[in-house]
């Protein structure tokens, strides 16, 4: 089940509550799923870890009156309390540790960037080879046909054979280049999302 499906079913199961209470519960469980995804779980696993929609709705409807007007929704039994703000000690440690963690963080970013640049340099080189193979195939066919027309049939056939081999090789390499490019883009996106996710302090996390 996806996050959107889960929230849709939860909203429907809580339809007897006032709209503002429904939205508070939906936001609460939306953040809970996002927290688990940020910790490395897949979306489907994060949704499954939160629990069954009907069980959650039954606990909510059994724990609070239908018209409760609390500033924050009651948490289902067994759910850990979520803090809203960083403690003063944590903020102080972050400030005092800035001369240490910031250079380390920048170094990690530089290493990540250099790895990504090297990876795409290899992929660009492979695409250059792919273009060269197609150029050799096209040029070889033209040169082979010209040689055959000029009376050098054996040489023309040999050149055409090499051109056809280059064309066949380029077809296989095309699929490899496309697959590697997609993989590199996906890995790059995940890497940068994970890195910049370190700066993302969401409400409800310590």
Image: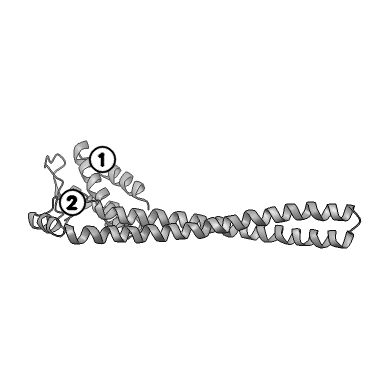
**Is residue 21 shown above or below 174?**
above
**Residue at the image position 78 percent from the left and 54 percent from the top:** 141
Residue positioned most to the left: 88
Quadrant of the image occupied by residue 24 = top left
C-alpha span from label 2 to label 1: 25 Å
Relative depth, front residue between 117 and 190: 117
Callout 1 environment at 10 Å: few (<14), some (14 to 19), or many (20+)? some
In the picture, measured across the screen, residue 177 lies left or right of residue 156, that is: left
SS for callout 1: loop
Q: Is residue 39 visible?
A: no
**Residue at the image position 58 percent from the left and 60 percent from the top:** 176
Residue positioned most to the top: 19
Question: The C terminus lies in which quarter of the figure?
Answer: bottom left
Relative depth, front residue between 177 and 44: 177
Identify the coloring.
one colour
Q: Which mark is residue 204?
A: 2
Q: Are marks 2 and 1 in contact (CB under 8 Å)?
A: no
**Residue at the image position 89 percent from the left and 59 percent from the top:** 153
SS for callout 2: loop
Lower position in the chain sequence, tag 2 or tag 1: 1
Judge depth for marks 2 and 1 and give the one in front: 2
Q: Is residue 28 visible?
A: yes
Q: Position of residue 80 (x, y in %)?
A: 16, 58
Callout 2 environment at 10 Å: few (<14), some (14 to 19), or many (20+)? some
In the picture, measured across the screen, residue 51 lies left or right of residue 81, that is: right
Quadrant of the image occupied by residue 163 = bottom right
Q: Position of residue 110 (x, y in %)?
A: 34, 58
**Residue at the image position 34 percent from the left and 50 percent from the top:** 3
Residue positioned most to the right: 151
Q: Which residue is mark 1?
A: 15
Quadrant of the image occupied by residue 148 = bottom right
């Amino acid at each position: 089940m996806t996050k959107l499906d889960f929230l849709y079913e939860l909203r429907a199961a809580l339809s007897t509550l006032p709209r503002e209470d429904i939205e508070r519960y939906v936001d609460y469980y939306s953040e809970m799923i996002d927290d688990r995804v940020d910790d490395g779980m897949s979306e489907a696993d994060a949704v499954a870890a939160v629990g069954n929609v009907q069980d959650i709705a039954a606990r909510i409807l059994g724990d609070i009156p239908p018209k409760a007007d609390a500033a924050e929704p009651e948490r289902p039994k067994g759910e850990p309390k979520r803090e809203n703000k960083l403690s003063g000690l944590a903020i102080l440690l972050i400030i005092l540790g800035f001369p240490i963690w910031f250079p380390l963080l920048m170094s990690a970013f530089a290493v990540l960037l250099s790895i990504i640049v090297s990876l795409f340099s290899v992929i660009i080189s492979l695409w250059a080879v792919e273009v060269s193979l197609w150029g050799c195939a096209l040029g070889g066919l033209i040169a082979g046909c010209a040689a055959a027309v000029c009376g050098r049939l054996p040489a023309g056939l040999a050149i055409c054979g090499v051109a056809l081999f280059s064309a066949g090789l380029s077809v296989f390499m095309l699929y490899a280049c496309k697959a590697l490019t997609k993989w590199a883009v996906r890995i790059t996106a995940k890497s940068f999302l994970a890195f910049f996710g370190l700066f993302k302090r969401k409400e409800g996390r310590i």
